[in-house]
Amino acid sequence: MVGPIRPQFVLFGSSIVQFSYSHQGWGAILSDLYSRKADILLRGYAGWNSRCGLQVLDEVFPKDATVQPSLVIIYFGGNDSLEPHPSGLGAHVPLPEYVENMRKIAIHLKSLSEKTRIIFLTAPAISEAQITEVFGNCLGRSNESCRKYSAACVQLCQELGVKVIDLWKAIQQRDDWSTACFTDGIHLSSEGSNIVVKEILEVLKETDWEPNLHWRSLPTEFPEISPYIFVGPKGETAVKVSHLDLEWQTQWH
């Protein structure tokens, strides 16, 4: 274990999580913003559905761990919402089972610690036209099916008192969402990831969790050391490097 021990934020889910460091993704942006404040741990597994997530839940989030995460961001649903394959194979999970799987995941995470906070991400919208252009067909995916699984996830989270971000709606608030928000109609481009980060930070900023987990609210690690290194451009004694607002961070206040 590398110290000092920071709050741990775990991103857990399928390819939307695994690829969140690609294409200026939302995981990479969070890691940048929290670089001296929290450790972002990636637990993403492309191709997985909620059944897979449930199967490894105790291994990824053991109840007897010495340190429990401060925040877990969960995403499953896009693969669950695929059309059933005639062979019986494939990632499809019937909607009622998906809801129960997500319920079990939420209950397990809530049992880890009184300080473990949870945010669910719903299945985002998809661009059927872009999927067809890239892959030749829609691969058993439809935006309407994503809507149903997204709505079910929102309803479940409201029932359980868990924070949820409706990505299906959030992405479509942008007029050019179907061409700008994806790399292939399914996975997020940098523009799509920007929407995810904005939604996550809004939840963290507005929710009355103690401590507040927004990146501007968490303490900066070793702030007392850096002021003694750099002299300001006007010759003042020190520049507090740890408190500088860097250009690429200013949009995330």
Image: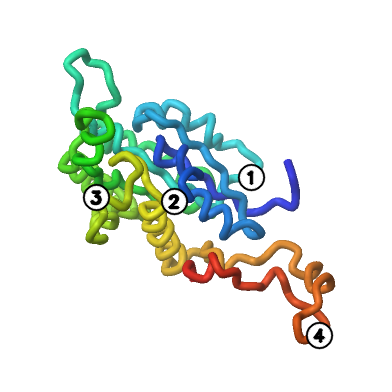
Residue at x 60% of width, y 65% of height: 218
Q: Earlier in the sequence, mark 2 or mark 1?
A: 1
Q: Position of residue 124 (x, y in %)?
A: 29, 47
Instruction: Name which residue type carries label 3.
Output: Ser
Secondary element under disc 4, as helix, strand or loop, is loop
Q: Which residue is mark 3?
A: 178
Q: Is residue 103 visible?
A: no
Nearer mark to the viewer, of 4 and 1: 4
| Circle nearer the N terminus (3, 4) | 3
Tell me the distance, in whole angstroms, between the alpha carbons under discs 3 and 4: 51 Å
Vertical relation: 137 (above or below) 182: above
Residue behind mark 1: 67
- Of residue 222 and residue 54, the one placed in the foreground of this image is 222
Mark 2, residue position? 118
Q: Earlier in the sequence, mark 4 or mark 1?
A: 1
Cα–Cα gap, marks 4 and 1? 44 Å
Within-10-Å neighbours for mark 1: few <14, some 14–19, many 20+: some
Q: CA distance from mark 3 to mark 1?
A: 41 Å
- Please identify, in this view, whether the residue under mark 3 or under mark 1 is nearer the observer: 3
Which residue is under mark 4?
Answer: 235
How far apart are the alpha carbons under marks 2 and 1? Answer: 16 Å
- Label 2 or label 3, whichever lies nearer to me, is 3
Label 1: element kind: loop
Residue for point 32% across, 39% down: 184
